[in-house]
Amino acid sequence: MWLNDISDLVERLRTRGAHKLALQFPAGLKRRAAEYATQLMEAGFEVIISGDPCYGACDLALDTLSHADVLVHIGHTPVDVRENVVFEPYPVGFDIAVLANALPLLKEKTVGLVTTVQHIHCIPGMESFLRENGIDVRVADGGVRAPNRGQVLGCSFAAARATHAPEILFVGTGVFHPIGIALSTGARVIALDPLTGIAQDVSGDALLRRRFAVMEKAREAESIGIIVSAKSGQERMALAERLSVLSKKAVIVTMREVSPDELLNLGFACYVNTACPRLAYDDQVRFPAPVLSPQEFEILCGVRTWDEYAIDEIV
Ligand code: SF4
């Protein structure tokens, strides 16, 4: 299934005067790379595919683009302004009636609605469904990093916060986004997986308990590496520099891929992650040492209280 008619993409690329294309796919869509490349070559373009891992528009294949006129990035929306990059979302539809599964869990009359990029085209239909069921539904802008109404990312929950609703309905897969929304907004959060139809009440409490344990392990660390990503939309050097002055043991480390092996090789007793926020929250069990978020490091250094704990977002 193509996300769009290929002729639309071809037309846009021709309008830009592109001849040589760099193609980039997230992991789940990479198997379509050859098929996509073939169609674009048949349309008269030269094509190069980026084969590196890619998890978001924060990680553009600028090295591959250096050999092409335009980078076609599939599956995400832009997180910043880039010339010579064409973003192609990959819409995944579902039967809007599945929202009925979430209705029994919603306790408030006013509910904020958010989703991830692949379901963003379903927002109007979901709004209508919820209104028809007596809910005062609110959908807000996601800001620069998440440019669609109602769109959240694992590093940006602005569209949820901006609803100012006491309860948020997240429609999408996995629990990371709804946990992040709960911690970011303080609202009650209901998560609905539109593909399985499973609806659940999600809280950030278990994540907070795990993070507290990680912080305790980091407390006595003799060396601290502050990770700065080399990826286009993850680099937060200014934040890292501000954090590095909080401890004499801290050293800034730039990295492209933050992997367990690389952290083991570097040998720091603790790390502070300013790259993709999900690394610290999702992948801690894989890492050889505690990996703190910037806010957690601030708490350990005494410049933020535990009551001021906040989930890390890239703004
Ligand atoms: S920084 Fe992480 S959460 Fe944000 S867009 Fe990139 S991969 Fe996704």
Image (cartoon, helix red, strand yellow):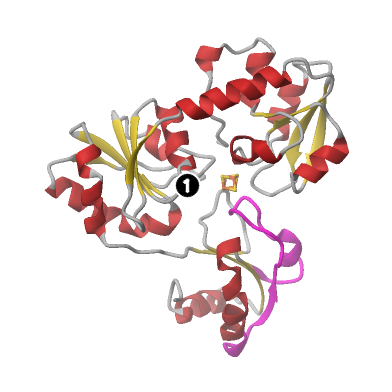
Residue sitting at x 62%, y 50%: 58
Is 48 within the magenta? yes
Q: Would residue 65 be found to the left or right of residue 208 on screen?
A: right
Residue sitting at x 38%, y 43%: 141
| Near-viewer residue (46 or 106) | 106
Q: Which residue is mark 1?
A: 146
Residue 185 in picture, x, y percent from top left: 40, 28
Residue 26 seen in this snapshot? no
Is 29 within the magenta? no
Q: Residues within 10 Å of mark 1 (few under 14, many from 20)?
A: many
Image quadrant in which you'd find residue 238: top right
Residue sitting at x 59%, y 25%: 211
Q: From which residue to which does the magenta span run?
A: 41-70
Residue 257 in picture, x, y percent from top left: 75, 48
Residue 26 position (above or below residue 313): below
| Near-viewer residue (15 or 88) | 88
Element under label 1?
loop
Residue 117 position (above or below residue 163): below
Residue 265 in picture, x, y percent from top left: 87, 40
Q: Quadrant for the C terminus, please.
A: top right
